[in-house]
Image: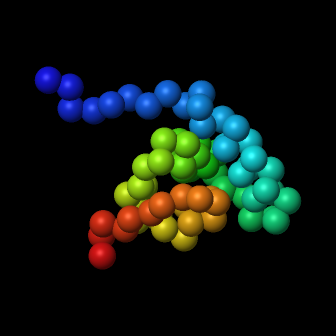
Amino acid sequence: MQKFTILPIFTSLDIYAREKARLRKKGNPLDDFDLLIGATAVSNHLTLATKNVSDFERIAGIKISDWTL
């Protein structure tokens, strides 16, 4: 029985690049790995569960759920 689905990142790279450029231009960059995680969530139409809402909410189109509240 498979408990996890592995998501390929290749479909997320366009969103990653667009958001990296947009955030850098605004002077508000995001760590590369966080940005890749967020871009993967956006490209797969997923909700990202995180306690680090303040960083991830900078990514356009992302849906976030803070399960620690």
Q: Residue furthest left?
A: 1
- Give how far across and how far down residue 57 sits, in percent: 56, 66
Q: Residue furthest top?
A: 1
The answer to whether residue 15 is left or right of residue 8 is: right
User: Given the current orientation, which residue lies at the most extreme right position?
Assistant: 25
Please give left or right for residue 4 compared with residue 31 in the image: left
Q: Position of residue 14 (x, y in %)?
A: 70, 38
Q: Vertical placement of 12 versus 59: above or below?
A: above
The residue sitting at 54% across, 49% down in the picture is 42
Q: Is residue 50 left or right of residue 14?
A: left
Q: Position of residue 47 (x, y in %)?
A: 41, 55
Q: Quarter-wise, where is residue 1 in the image? A: top left
Q: Is residue 37 left or right of residue 59?
A: left
The quarter of the displayed image where residue 30 is located? bottom right
Quarter-of-image position of residue 55: bottom right
Residue drawn at 21 percent across, 32 percent down? 3
Q: Name the spot of residue 69 as percent of width and height, x first.
A: 30, 76
State the residue in front, 2 or 34. Answer: 2
The answer to whether residue 37 of the structure is visible from this angle is no
Residue 47 seen: yes
